[in-house]
Image: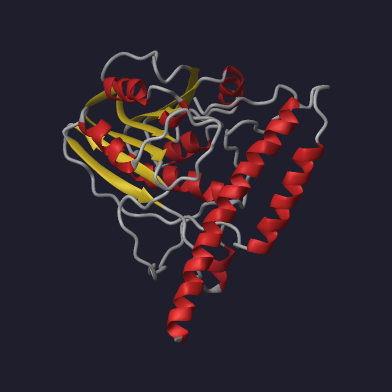
């Protein structure tokens, strides 16, 4: 349900499917891993549905956090076959359409689905299905791009919701609803050598987090909704750090992607390569726009201080 498929001749992703194997170190990796790492705090001892699981990196995070069982579903049969071959003992995967899940009512304690509902024209149907398979008192965790902030023009997004619209849709289905805000900031950290070496989505212990800018709810790039018929857990916030932010590097990569896309031969089996280039180009534009926005804010702050 990610609006993408895998190229039959390669394991590289096409469309908008995220694969950490090929996107390591990019902002998109931090965004995707942060969502699952944050949701994993609610997984221990629970039967979990990972809706639109893709390459199952998130299913592995949920399973590793102590879930009793993780069931991942995805629309792409080839991807499901690939991840099933490497499934852990407490995980299994099925081909399924998120608008018509192959499960009975009240089957899961925790239902997770990230960056899914914007890929269908009727996100309400997906939310209805997620609510149907969730046990009474269970927890639903769903994310979607905030239409008011997210870079427009993504060809794989059929219907985006604003933060308020998303809140309203969840409130129609659940008694308890709260929103969490996911956004990207420029950060600077000070660590000892051991912490400086930490990577691969590992936890940083003994780190104090400070925020130098103030933002308002509704200004986040991605909105994460948590909903239940019972009491909502509080949970803790999470920050995922990725590779260095370098505007010059992104500009060079953007120029290279533009050139490659403009000169890519059509036909002869190259459609998948062109589609991959388009996806990378869209991601680069989004990352560059976000970084340039933060740079402009810092420049404005410096000018105010100087005056």
Q: Position of residue 103 (x, y in %)?
A: 35, 14
Q: Nearer the viewer, residue 238 or 223?
A: 223
Q: Residue at x 67, y 37 (%)?
A: 278
> Can you name the residue that lies furthest to the bottom here?
307
Q: Nearer the viewer, residue 216 or 238?
A: 216
Q: Position of residue 281 (x, y in %)?
A: 66, 43
Q: Quadrant of residue 140?
A: top left
Q: Position of residue 291 (x, y in %)?
A: 55, 59
Q: Residue at x 74, y 32 (%)?
A: 273
Is residue 54 left or right of 183 when viewed as pictured?
right
Q: Can see residue 107?
A: no
The C terminus lies in which quarter of the figure? bottom left
Q: Position of residue 232 (x, y in %)?
A: 21, 41
Is residue 51 left or right of 191 when viewed as pictured?
left
Q: Can see residue 44?
A: yes
Q: Residue at x 65, y 42 (%)?
A: 280
> Can you name the residue that lies furthest to the front here?
307
Q: Nearer the viewer, residue 233 or 276?
A: 276
250, above or below 280, in the image = below
Is residue 134 left or right of 158 when viewed as pictured?
left
């Amino acid at each position: 349900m990610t609006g993408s498929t895998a190229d039959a001749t390669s394991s590289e992703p096409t469309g908008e499917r995220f694969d950490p194997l090929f996107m390591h170190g990019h902002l998109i990796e931090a965004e995707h891993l942060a969502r699952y790492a944050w949701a994993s705090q609610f997984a221990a001892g629970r039967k979990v549905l990972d809706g639109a699981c893709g390459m199952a990196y998130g299913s592995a995070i949920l399973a590793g956090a102590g879930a009793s069982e993780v069931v991942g579903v995805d629309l792409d049969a080839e991807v499901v076959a690939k991840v099933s071959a490497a499934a852990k003992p407490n995980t299994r995967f099925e081909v399924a359409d998120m608008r018509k899940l192959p499960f009975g009512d009240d089957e899961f304690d925790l239902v997770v689905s990230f960056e899914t509902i914007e890929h269908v024209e009727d996100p309400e149907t997906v939310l209805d299905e997620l609510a149907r398979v969730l046990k009474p008192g269970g927890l639903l965790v769903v994310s979607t791009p905030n239409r008011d902030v997210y870079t427009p023009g993504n060809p794989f997004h059929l219907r985006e919701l604003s933060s308020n619209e998303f809140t309203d849709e969840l409130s129609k289905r659940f008694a308890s609803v709260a929103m969490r805000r996911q956004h990207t900031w420029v950060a600077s950290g000070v660590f000892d050598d051991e912490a400086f070496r930490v990577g691969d989505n590992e936890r940083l212990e003994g780190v104090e987090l400070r925020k130098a800018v103030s933002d308002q709810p509704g200004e986040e790039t991605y909105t994460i909704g948590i909903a239940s018929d019972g009491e909502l857990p509080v949970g803790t916030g999470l920050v995922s750090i990725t590779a260095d932010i370098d505007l010059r590097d992104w500009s060079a990569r953007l120029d290279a992607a533009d050139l490659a896309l403009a000169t890519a031969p059509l036909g002869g089996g190259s459609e998948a390569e062109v589609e991959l280039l388009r996806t990378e180009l869209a991601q680069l534009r989004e990352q560059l726009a976000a970084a340039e926005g933060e740079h402009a804010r810092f420049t404005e702050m410096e000018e105010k201080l100087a005056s």
